[in-house]
Amino acid sequence: MEEKKLDLNSIIGMLLIVGIFFWMMYQNKPSEAQLAAEKAKKELVAKEAQAKAVAAKQAVAPAAVITPGDSTQLAKLQKTLGGFAYSATLPSAKNDITTIENDYVLLKIANKGGYIVEATLKNFEKFKKNSGQLVSLIKDNNADLNIQLQTNDSRVLNTKDLYFEPALTKVGADQILSMKLKAGANEFLEYKYILKPNDYMVGFDIRSQGLNKVLNTAKPLDLQWNMKTYRSEKSIAYENRYTEVRYQYEDNKHNYVNDGTDKEESPDKVGYIAFKQHFFTSILLTNTPFEKAVLKSNKLALDETKDTIFIKDFKASVPLALQNGEVDYKMSWYFGPTDYATLKAYDKDIEKIVPLGWGIFGWINKFIFIPLFGFLTGGISYGIAIIIFTILIKLAMSPITYKSFLSQAKMKVLRPDITELGEKYKKDPLKKQQETMKLYNKAGVNPMAGCIPALIQLPFMYASFQFFPSAFELRQKGFLWADDLSSFDSVYKLPFHIPLYGDHISLFPILAAIAIFFYMKMTSGDQQMAAPQQEGMPDMAKMMKYMIYISPIMMLIFFNSYGAGLSLYNFISNLITIGIMFVIKNYIVDSDKIHAQIQENKLKEPKKPGKFQQRLQEAMEQAEAQKKAKK
């Protein structure tokens, strides 16, 4: 009896458990709204999967559905593509990519459009913030190449929308990629890319065959090259300043499109077009000059305080002349650094895109600064190279500095005599000028001697302002606290932005400003003592007093976002000049000897005045005679 009772209890317990389970299921049963939502979700997932499948089929539709022998489909395509419908029937009519590369560049060329969709430089990284990312001049649809085709049946087609047939071969170590946009088995427009080992230059030929039957040959083809330039450097403002369209035109002339929004130039006989960034460039060169070009530049980084992807938008449109209804151009692409030595090695004048300055400034950079700096950077730190470079330049200029200071010392000795003449002829300024010139001549002092040496140094100073921002060698080369001598050496990030100054503090400009302050403080006193104020002329003493403070402030403001290499050069330059002036003043120039020599010269027969002094004296005498005649 006990066993039966236990079995009955077990059965009752199991039934209770099952009942509770079904009751819980009933309580948690989804509502009608929930069931409807779940059903809609499943249908949406199914539709998305179907859409993806359709899209995948469409991407290869021409190759998968249409065949060269399918005349029905060919006739349908001819309604939109005209003579180039044939290209859509080939297996290559899909979004495939062909890659060619060497140790310098990697290029990807798309079947659709036949143009380069990626150009990456293998040996250069973007600014340190994104360390590890290689510099890509072309990537993610920032650039395209297109030729407008006008057909005999009045259609306007764009090659960037049509499919080319690729064929990659090798001739020795050269890679040759032929991309053909076909209108028939033997009628085509061809882009031919030729990439050699260890080279930034890519051969690029455009030719057609048999298209005189397809195209309207009444006017040239229109080639369009567009590019939005990526930001590759730390300083947006600095990169923006040196990013521009440059070109060669009319028998080896060189120019650029002005900076700003919607700027345009239309040069003739164009030999090359360069979409130049600060330290990298993309150049299209042609053996047969383009008859005309329309070049446009549009500034995209309007607010340089904000981070940005693109710096500027460049557009170029050129005509491709037809001969007997066909086109045949031998051209080249350059994708590489904006490095003077690298560009000059091609012997195609493309080094002219590097802004080294015009006239004598360019000559100083080409024949002094570039060779000297290149020699010094052969195995030492670039910061040390800048210091040695500056020392050599300043030592070479020291004789000029000596002559300038010697002239100031002579003028300082003559100051009492000049002051005396000023008092004597206070009411007759013209007479005072004449007597002052006679005093200079008798004492053997040339008042212009102090100005001429300073003027000789100015071209070297201006040349340095062109050289250092263009020195590719400094890019991402560190020295002391500066991690990149081609950009600003920020030591502190400000929580706000100061107009003109920026949102950071650079240390080298501060050091350069301090050095220029002490240099001007050291020299201004002698200049004021040497040159007394002339009646009717500005008070130079006051101007120099103001400049002592204005110059360092300007240095701080404008150099804060400039490259650290240029600030380092100016700091060392002013430091060395202070040292040279100190040595000259205290150990070389003897004021007593100069005074004795001037007194001795006064007793001698006065020298014949120079041509300039003679003309100046004659002019003053004529003015004096006219004044007396009026009276």
Image (spheres, helix red, strand yellow):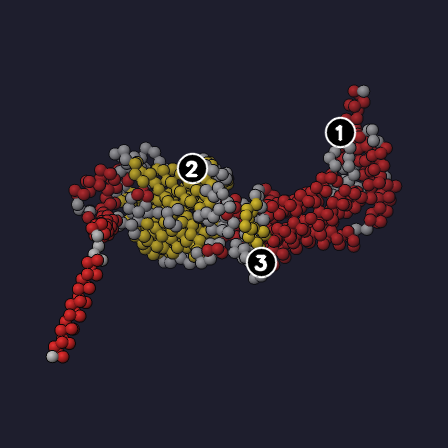
**Which of 337 and 557 lies nearest the eye of the viewer?**
557
Establish if 113 lies above or below 424: below
Could you tell whether 539 is left or right of 117 in the image?
right
Residue tagged by mark 1? 619
| SS at circle 1 | helix
Residue type, mark 2 in image: Ala
* One can see residue 506 in this view: yes
Residue tagged by mark 2? 293
| SS at circle 3 | loop
- Residue 481: which disc? 3
* One can see residue 326 in this view: no
For the point 49% across and 38% down, the residue is: 260
Quick one: label 2 or label 3, which is nearer the N terminus?
Answer: 2
For the residues labelled 3 and 1, say whether their Cβ atoms are less than 8 Å apart.
no
**Which of 506 and 360 lies nearest the eye of the viewer?**
506
For the residues labelled 2 and 3, say whether their Cβ atoms are less than 8 Å apart.
no
| SS at circle 2 | loop
For the point 64% across and 53% down, the residue is: 511
Per the model, the C-alpha gap separating discs 2 and 3 is 46 Å
Circle 1 packing at 10 Å, graded few (<14), some (14-19), many (20+), is few
Could you tell whether 169 is left or right of 382 in the image?
left
**Which image quadrant: the C terminus?**
top right
| Residue 585 location (% of width, % of height) | 77, 51
For the point 27% across and 33% down, the residue is: 154
For the point 12% across and 77% down, the residue is: 4
**Which image quadrant: the N terminus?**
bottom left
Residue type, mark 3 in image: Trp
Quick one: label 3 or label 1, which is nearer the N terminus?
Answer: 3
Quick one: label 2 or label 1, which is nearer the N terminus?
Answer: 2
Residue, far right: 603
